Image (cartoon, rainbow, N blue to C red):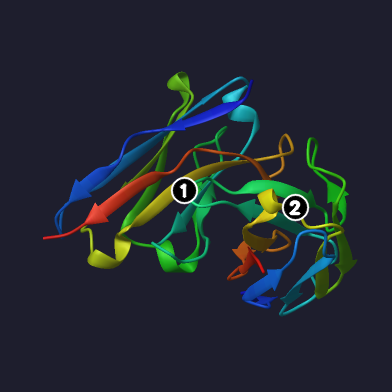
């Protein structure tokens, strides 16, 4: 099974900061990776698919990069509404989610 | 618009069974695979498996083989998850989720149900 490791598990940042979240796969998954945002009490929302494609309706301050085993989600200028937990997901072989990064305001 | 609407919260005792439904609307149900995801309280997301909505064939992740059954009522555009012999560790919110791309089994999930909380307690 493919394992997904996210870091950090908790991130504190200020409004306007550039924020980077990481996700590492235990084997090559090419670009079969998605990022989700989940706010408390809600279903996850798809932000990025195929590692770097922005889902329709998602603000352009969100971007994804990477391929193979190492991936990054970047928020170019953090907004208060971005406080949430972020999960990566591989769909190269079955599906696996990372444990999540909780993003809070400093 | 595309919607996945799940059944309401459930309170069950250990050893009982529960059936959760996920009713789809706004698209052709049999064209897109349906997946199930578990989220224990305060924890992350765990992929449970998926069901081919055209053939009805289920595929289970390793940790969900045995007590978990995916099924369909295709005429009602509904996918179901049944859990038997409930245990305390089954307490979680269960989500159905639809893949983005037609006729693709694995992929990102663009559409999610609102989640169904199952609480198992004696």
Q: Residue furthest left?
A: B122
Q: Nearer the viewer, mark 2 or mark 1?
A: 2
Q: Cβ–Cβ below 8 Å for labels 2 and 1? A: no
Instruction: Indicate left or right for A88 with A55 as reference.
Output: left
Q: Earlier in the sequence, mark 2 or mark 1?
A: 1
Quadrant where the C terminus of chain B sits is bottom left
Identify the residue under disc 2.
A79
User: In the rendering, at what x and y percent does residue A97 appear?
Assistant: 61, 64
Q: Is residue B88 above or below residue B12?
A: below
Q: Are marks 2 and 1 on the same chain?
A: yes
Q: Is residue B45 visible?
A: yes
- As helix, strand or loop, the secondary structure at mark 1 comes to loop
Q: Is residue A51 above or below residue A27?
A: above
In the picture, residue A87 is in which quadrant?
bottom right
Quadrant where the N terminus of chain B sits is top right
**Chain identifier of the residue bearing label 1 in the image:** A
Instruction: Indicate left or right for B114 with A72 as reference.
Output: left
Q: Is residue B84 visible?
A: no
Q: Nearer the viewer, residue B19 or B61?
A: B19
Identify the residue under disc 1.
A41
Residue at 43% over, 68% down:
B63
């Amino acid at each position: 099974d493919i394992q997904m490791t996210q870091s950090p598990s908790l991130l504190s940042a200020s409004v306007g900061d550039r924020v980077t979240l990481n996700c590492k796969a235990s084997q090559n998954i090419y670009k079969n990776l998605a990022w989700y945002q989940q706010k408390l009490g809600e279903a996850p929302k798809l932000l990025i698919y195929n590692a770097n494609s922005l889902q329709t309706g998602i603000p352009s301050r969100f971007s994804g990069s990477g391929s193979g085993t190492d991936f990054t989600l970047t928020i170019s200028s953090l907004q208060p509404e971005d406080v949430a937990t972020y999960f990566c997901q591989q769909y190269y072989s079955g599906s696996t989610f990372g444990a999540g990064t909780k993003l809070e305001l400093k | 618009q595309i919607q996945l609407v799940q059944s309401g919260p459930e309170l069950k005792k250990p050893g009982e069974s529960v059936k959760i439904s996920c009713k789809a609307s706004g698209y052709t149900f049999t064209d897109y695979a349906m997946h199930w995801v578990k989220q224990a309280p305060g924890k992350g997301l765990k992929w449970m498996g998926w069901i081919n909505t055209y053939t009805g064939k289920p595929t289970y992740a390793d940790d969900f083989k045995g007590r978990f059954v995916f099924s369909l009522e295709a005429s009602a555009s509904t996918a179901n998850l049944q859990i038997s012999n409930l245990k305390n560790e089954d307490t979680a919110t269960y989500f159905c989720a639809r893949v983005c791309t037609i006729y693709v089994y694995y992929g990102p999930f663009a559409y999610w149900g609102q989640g169904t909380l199952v609480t198992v307690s004696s």
